[in-house]
Image: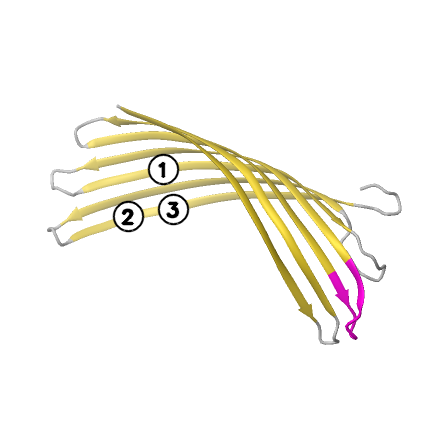
Amino acid sequence: FNYFGGYDFRRRNNPGSGFNDNRYNDGSRVYNTSDNGRKGNSHTVRLGADFFATEKTTLGLSANINLRDNTRREDLFYTYYDPTGAVIGTSPRYTNQNEDDTGYEFNFDFKREFVREGEELTANVSYGRSKEDGIQTFEQTATDPSIVIDPNRINDTYEDGKNVNIQVDYVLPFSKEQKLETGYRTTLRYSDEQQLSNTFSSSSGTY
């Protein structure tokens, strides 16, 4: 037997910025700048074992689990111009999102070597699943009532993905310079994504 394991920790911090300048045929214009960032931590634990059934046959089992958290934000600042170039008004928009992710994967590996040097058959079957829960908030205001904006809202998001991979490879050498490689692979994916959006009612003051 051969046993192995590992732990991986990652910390991410991705700041960014940008701008958009939209000009329309009637001469009006909407200009906005953005300031955004994404921070997160990730923990991954991996464990596994190889079993040398014979001198030329190896079986392997491994699994890993991953826990992640992400915080995203995006601040947009709009400026609206009329066809004469005069400023109509401004509108800031603030977006925040918090996510908690969980993922795991199981792998089965098979390797068989033959009498001819370099001839081998390998196979892998893996199953993985990843789930994500998040809360996203939008807040936008405008200095002029004629400016059309998205209403404030709270989005409750959920994602659930499953993945199955099956792969078989065979190598048959004819000489040092020539060999035949053939194989088969299929991937099955399932994805479920849901979002519940609560919009803010200015008349009642509630979502």
Question: If the image is split into quadrants, where does the C terminus sit?
Answer: top right
Q: Residues within 10 Å of mark 2 (few under 14, many from 20)?
A: few
User: Which secondary structure, mark 3?
Assistant: strand
- 86 part of magenta stretch: yes
Q: Sequence order check: which comes first, mark 3 or mark 1? A: 1
Residue beneath the point at 12% across and 51% down: 174
Closest to the observer: 174 or 152?
Answer: 152
Mark 1–mark 2 CB contact (< 8 Å): no
Question: Label 2 amino acid?
Answer: Gly
Q: Do the residues labelled 2 and 3 touch (CB within 8 Å)?
A: no
Local packing at callout 1 (Cα closer than 10 Å; few below 14, some 14-19, many 20+) is some
Crowd class of label 3 (few under 14; some 14 to 19; many from 20; radius 10 Å): few
Separation of residues labelled 1 and 2 (CA atoms): 14 Å
The residue range painted magenta reads: 79-90
Dividing the picture into quarters, in which one does residue 52 lie?
Answer: top left
User: Judging from the image, what secondary structure is the residue with disc 2 in?
Assistant: strand
Amino acid on which disc 3 is placed: Thr
The residue indicated by pointer 2 is 183
The picture quadrant where one finds residue 49 is: top left
Out of 119 and 20, give the one closest to the viewer.
20
Q: Which residue is denoted by mark 3 in the rendering?
A: 186
Element type at mark 1: strand
Residue that appears at 24% across and 36% down: 111
Q: The disc labelled 1 sits on which kind of residue?
A: Val
Mark 2 to mark 3 CA distance (whole Å) = 10 Å
200 displayed left or right of 107: right
Residue 73 is situated, as x and y percent measured from the top left of the image, at 64, 46
Residue 191 appears in which quarter of the rendering?
Answer: top right
Q: Going by the image, does 182 lie left or right of 153?
A: left
The residue lying at 28 percent from left, 48 percent from top is: 183
In this view, 19 is above or below 124 = below
Q: In this view, does 34 lie to the left or right of 79?
A: left
